[in-house]
Amino acid sequence: MDVTVANYRQQLLRLLPQGPAWPQDEGDLAARLLNALALTYLSAHKAAEQLHDEADPRAASALLDDWERNYGLPDPCLAPAVSVADRRSRLVQKVVWNGGQSRAFFIGLLASVGYPGATITEFRSFRANSKCNAALNQGGWRNAWRVNIPIGADVRRMKVNSRCNEPLASWGDPGLQCLLAKHKPAQTILYISYGVSP
């Protein structure tokens, strides 16, 4: 139900004592005082309704900065969000995000930051059933895993109008490296491979 000034004024009029000392005419000083009080109560009512909406991060606006501060946003690994909608989207993602260390978790994380189709390669350490001539440290790949970013993802090539001192090709996303390093299992070594065909 939408509450108006008239609703609050009507409630205040009903609280007044009855009699000629308390006139209820519109132009009267007491009626103007009641109008001012009704406006104040309506303003407090609207603020309380907005505070109820602010409890949901999908609708937060006045408390968006507080929500972001409590959830560690803006994330130093990601480019700053430009619009309020982007800020809310990142906040909601952070609130509902559970984390994890599975292959599915990291593939979902990569897809959510703009790398759909990424795959993960895990390198096996030496085991009892490994071949007899297999190296014990698997060529230095023990506890290592690799994220394979699909072809064309953040690969920049030299163009005709590029400066002569630019590299022929460059790749890499420092934000992605930061994000994965923050969430990878502590004992592992992470490699990122760009331009891998699926």
Image: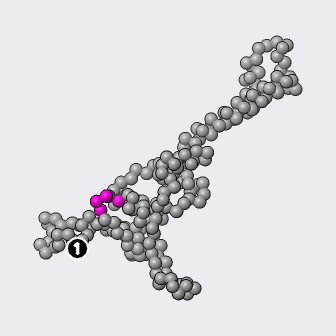
**166 is higher (above) or lower (below) than 127:** below
| In the image: residue 130, left or right of residue 79 | left
Callout count: 1
User: Which residue corresponds to the image point at 59% horizontal and 41% vertical from the top-left?
Assistant: 53
User: Which residue corresponds to the image point at 78% horizontal and 25% vertical from the top-left?
Assistant: 34
In the image, which residues are magenta? Answer: 184-188
Residue 18: percent from left, percent from top: 79, 13
Quarter holding the N terminus is: top right
Q: Residue furthest top?
A: 19
Q: Secondary structure at mark 1?
A: helix
User: Which residue corresponds to the image point at 42% horizontal and 63% vertical from the top-left?
Assistant: 178
Q: Based on the picture, tell me whether residue 35 belongs to the magenta stretch.
A: no
**Residue 24, can we see it?**
yes
Quarter holding the C terminus is: bottom left
Tell me the colour scheme of the image. one colour
Q: Which residue is under mark 1?
A: 139
| In the image: residue 148, left or right of residue 14 | left
Q: Foreground residue, 65 or 193?
A: 65
* Kind of residue indicated by mark 1: Gly
User: Which residue corresponds to the image point at 41% horizontal and 76% vertical from the top-left?
Assistant: 195
* Residue 86 lies in quadrant: bottom right
**103 is higher (above) or lower (below) than 72:** below
